[in-house]
Image (spheres, grey):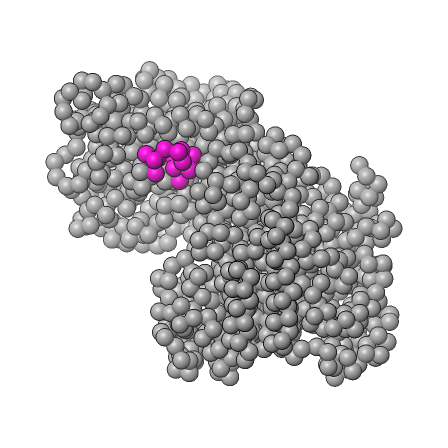
Amino acid sequence: MTDLEAALRRAVRGEVGFDTTSRALTTMDASNYRRVPLGVVAPRDADDVAAVLEVCRERGVPVVARGGGTSIAGQATGTGVVLDFTRHMNRLVGIDPEARTAVVQPGVVLDRLQDAAAPHGLRFGPDPSTHSRCTLGGMIGNNSCGSHSVAWGTTADSVRELSVLTARGRRLRLGQEWAGAPEGLRGLVDGELARLRTGFPDLPRRISGYALDALLPERGADVARSFCGSEGTLGVLTEAVVGLVESPRARALAVLGYADEADAAEAAAGLLPLGPLTVEGMAVDLVPSTEGLPRGGAWLFVETGGDTEAEARTRAEAVVRAADVVDALVVTDPGGQRTLWRIREDASGTATRMPDGSEAWPGWEDCAVPPARLGGYLRDFRRLLTAHELRGTPYGHFGDGCIHVRIDFDLLSADGVARFRRFSQELADVVVAHGGSLSGEHGDGQARAELLPRMYGAETVALFERAKAVWDPDDLLNPGMLVRPAPLDANLRFSVLPREPVDVEFGYPSDGGDFSAAVRRCVGVAKCRTTSVSGADVMCPSYRATGEEAHSTRGRARLLHEMLAGELVTDGWRSTEVRDALDLCLSCKGCRSGCPVEVDMATYKAEFLHHHYAGRRRPAAHYAMGWLPVWLRWAARTRTAPVVNALASVRPLAAVAKRLGGIAGEREVPRLAGETFSRWWRRRGGRPTEGGDLVVLWPDTFTEHLSPSVGRAAVRVLEAAGLRVALPPTLRGRGVVGDGTSKSPLALLTARRGGRVCCGLTYVSTGQLDRARAVMRRTLDLMAPVLETSAPVVVLEPSCAAALRTDLPELLHDDPRAARLAARVLTFAEALERHAPDWTPPRVNLPAVGQTHCHQHAVLGDAADRRLRESAGLTGELSGGCCGLAGNFGFEAGHYEVSAACAEDQLLPAVREAPDGAVVLADGFSCRTQLEQLAGARGRHLAEVLAEGLE
């Protein structure tokens, strides 16, 4: 233990982390930069902060304050001690509705403040797109803005008082009329009044540099306002009093379509006199699908408010009339507005990929110009991109003249980095020529601070340095930011990654087969760190259960990045730090769809486990549950299911078996079916009926051995819909479509016994990829005659369907049959919709509760299921999140508490609050098991509900 670590442990009551994991998690923010800290401290209160500053000051160690870690310019990284305020100093101290103020600690997440203010008809004005995870401390440090800044301004406009600790331990209460000003600040300002009155651009989004002009006497000498945007370089915030605004009772959203982004930009300023709440812009490049949007190549999102829906709509329609548009849409339905706003908010992640899938990076993420000059600036910006052979798609706060853009810089080669520097310098001059600010929201950090002399001139920048010396004479706080900055092309986070491709098992088709590129997908926007789920969102259940960065998708991606870098995490695939972080990953695949850049941590986990345990003994659970299909087939072949069930009901025997198998002692072992689904199928004849389209029903391991009632119900419903049902072959030989269907008698005579088809899911989830490949290839051999037909493959278990759609072609990327089978896979609802479009399901007419299976949400989609439920009269929305059992995860020893916490997040409360007579829908076996074991509730597959309705 170092002297610094020991001193901090003695001095503070919060957590002190100098271990590899703690440091690795904070090497990066959402920027292009990386710095390795000495350690991380999570202070419990202001006294802890003071103690950290004292210990670090005595040893000359820098201190960096960090909130959500989503800074895009690099200012949340540092080489000293990082202060993490999100763990303890995250309280909403109180709200005063009459005064319209709130008292918050720096680590409180914005959405929490908004939720607390909403019952009073109030809200905090600024709302960045990261509102579900950004902290008030970070917003004050960056002077954040968000989409409503045309109505309610920046964070500085909402700050009333700030409690701050200086690096030398002084406790200040900052406010107007020089309240809390450190000694020497007033004299500095009095000597530079002329410069402060003339040297700062006048535009709504000037975030660059220190806001020293807020100290002018005619502006109230507001020390708190001047502190905003200082990026943790002047003092450490411990508490803030912020102003709240009245929230409109009703809102309408006008979406205005334009031919291109320049037309939209030129129109934005003209809409400001109408008093909109937002004027946001984005182009078609950032929209995965234009469904639901009006015609056009670019759009303005203009929100209006009112006391009633009619009043808000009237104002929105006035906006449409005033705008010269290609097409327009006005939405007053809150759900419809949320859907549209999500398109805009996800742009911060979507923009990290170009339309062709290549990477794009921040660096010139948020410069701003006067709104009236935005169209001209965008044209100059586009010309500069073309001159440098770069690409980027601007979007952002058009009403404030603030543009966000990610650019496809090559930050991996020396030539690419040199071009990054040249472009940055030239673009800074373009911004200044248009009267703009290098930063319009996210701060200067390392990305732009070097270029501040181009905007302000050398003398004003020297004034910034003098102001920094007044506040922090020892240069202890976040050094290298804003003043005396590091070069904008130093400390790039990509420089430490391997240049040669890493030898991996999966194909990573979206990343050119490069595992490093897959890991680089995580850019740190931290959508995985949200503490609540909206709609059917899944990501990230383990983070919501633990609140630990290491158990977020971003945290795991950071550790994998450091594993590849080899500086902090030095033992590569054998890393225990990465293993432990991945241990609580449920492999729910929620990040595959919920993450704006589609990080697929479930695949990364399987990849890591494969390498980590190569040639080594695995945990017992990998053998017990990874090989579950084998054990269940043995039980079926030997007809010992009743014996297994009887032994499992004897508690002492079950306890021993669970301990040997690495299964959580709190879990009950599911009962094996007395008759497998396939045996029932053979008993009823084993042949398709005559009639409509042929569909091949996949007998997954769970349906086959644990819940054959689901398979029987699906057969009944599919046949009632006029479809011919067959099962996959168990014989190898050309022409055998199902065990009872052959193109010729000779084919049956010459066929060889081939076993059962299997998607390989349990082997993939435990990282046994060699075994998974063998199982998948055997399955492809068996399915060869099916692939010669046009028959779809109907998979009832969502996790198995997802494995066939994604894991199969990505793991067997060298076998064209894998992609062909993946393309055939349909869910139960999709099969009915596509192959029995004229069939009308029975009217069940009951409320339904439950949860959309996480793999269904992430990989398969549930649109067909929603339509089928609606046709059957099953009303109500299913919740989001993950059930928490997630295949083998919830059964593994040490996972029970997290598994139960995940279920309590969405699923169990929804079931408890269900109306009388409600159907509990759960298409996944894991979901049904979790419901039964934690809530005593019986979940049913949609096929079972419809089969019952046929009666």
Observer-nearest residue: 109 or 139?
A: 139
- x, y (%) of residue 509? 44, 42
- x, y (%) of residue 519? 55, 44
Whether 642 is drawn above or below 834: the answer is above
- The stretch in magenta equals 806-819
Observer-nearest residue: 86 or 489?
A: 489
Whether 330 is drawn above or below 634: the answer is below
- x, y (%) of residue 723? 18, 40
Q: Residue at x 82, y 47 (%)?
A: 11
Image quadrant where one finds the C terminus: top left
Image quadrant where one finds the N terminus: top right
Residue, far top = 638
Which image quadrant for residue 561?
Answer: top right
Give the left or right position of residue 826, taking residue 486 as reference.
left
Observer-nearest residue: 770 or 5?
A: 770
Residue, far left = 690
Whether 582 is drawn above or below 485: the answer is above
Which image quadrant for residue 145?
Answer: bottom right
Q: Residue at x 82, y 62 (%)?
A: 472
Question: Can residue 611 be seen at all in this image of the molecule?
Answer: yes
Q: Residue at x 80, y 66 (%)?
A: 465
Q: Is residue 809 magenta?
A: yes
Q: Is residue 7 magenta?
A: no
- x, y (%) of residue 206? 65, 73
Q: Residue at x 76, y 49 (%)?
A: 80
Observer-nearest residue: 2 or 86?
A: 2
The chief SS type of the magenta part is helix
Question: Can residue 302 be seen at all in this image of the molecule?
Answer: no
Whether 515 is drawn above or below 419: the answer is above
